């Protein structure tokens, strides 16, 4: 039987602060593309467990599993780049009492809060997962409504 390469499975975590800004950084190994915290789902790992692990590994933010709310998933295909992932998108609130730390400076730039206006108005050299998030959400108003509804 032919050895077929299967899609990767990952997730993107939309971390919102009290101003409804999203936490982003540049992925240094992916042409400085802007992305949320996130990563690969490990074998036998629940989505919320992956969120906890990845958020802690990348930002030093520690949340409980119940803090992550499911938004949607996307089948992301970029044949010309030999890229195929199934990405899950979850949202959570930033706990103000915790300090954000760039715990992987070899992998990404320092984390920054970005207004949703800027997310939908500017081309910030997005990572594929963020490109798909922006397409799905369409505009700032719809995005804010869907994120806040999920967090209720």
Image (cartoon, helix red, strand yellow):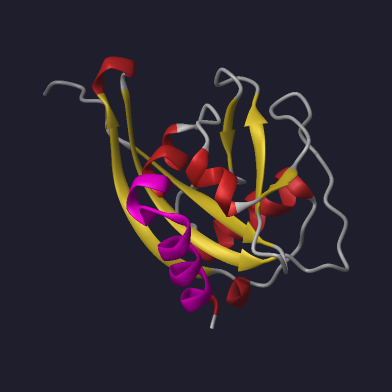
Quadrant of the rendered image containing residue 61: bottom right
First to last magenta residue range: 134-150
Q: Give the image location of residue 93, x and y in percent.
A: 67, 68
What residue is drawn where x is 76% and y is 48%?
Answer: 59
Please, what is the dominant secondary structure of the magenta stretch?
A: helix
- Taking the image as shown, residue 76 lies to the left or right of residue 151, namely left
Residue 112 lies, in percent from the top left, at: 74, 43
Q: Where on the picture, by quarter, is residue 28?
A: top right
Q: Position of 67 compared to 4: left or right? A: right
Image point (24%, 21%), residue name? 79
From the viewer's side, name the closer residue of 22 and 61.
22
Q: Residue furthest left?
A: 1
- Which quadrant does the C terminus fall into? bottom right
* Image location (x, y in percent) of residue 37: 62, 46
Lateral position of residue 143 relative to residue 107, left or right? left
Q: Position of residue 57 (x, y in %)?
A: 72, 46
């Amino acid at each position: 039987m032919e050895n077929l390469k299967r899609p990767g499975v990952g997730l993107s975590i939309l971390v919102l602060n009290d101003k409804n800004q999203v936490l982003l950084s540049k992925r240094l190994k992916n042409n400085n593309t802007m992305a949320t915290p996130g990563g690969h789902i490990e074998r036998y790992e629940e989505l919320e467990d992956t969120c906890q692990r990845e958020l802690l590994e990348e930002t030093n933010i520690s949340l409980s599993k119940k803090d992550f709310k499911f938004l949607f998933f996307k089948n992301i295909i970029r044949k010309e780049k030999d890229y195929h992932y199934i990405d899950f998108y979850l949202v959570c609130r930033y706990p103000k009492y915790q300090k954000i730390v760039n715990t992987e400076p070899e992998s990404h730039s320092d984390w920054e809060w970005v207004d949703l206006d800027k997310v939908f108005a500017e081309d910030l050299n997005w990572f594929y997962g963020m490109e798909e998030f922006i397409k799905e959400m369409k505009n700032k108003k719809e995005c804010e409504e869907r994120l806040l509804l999920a967090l209720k």
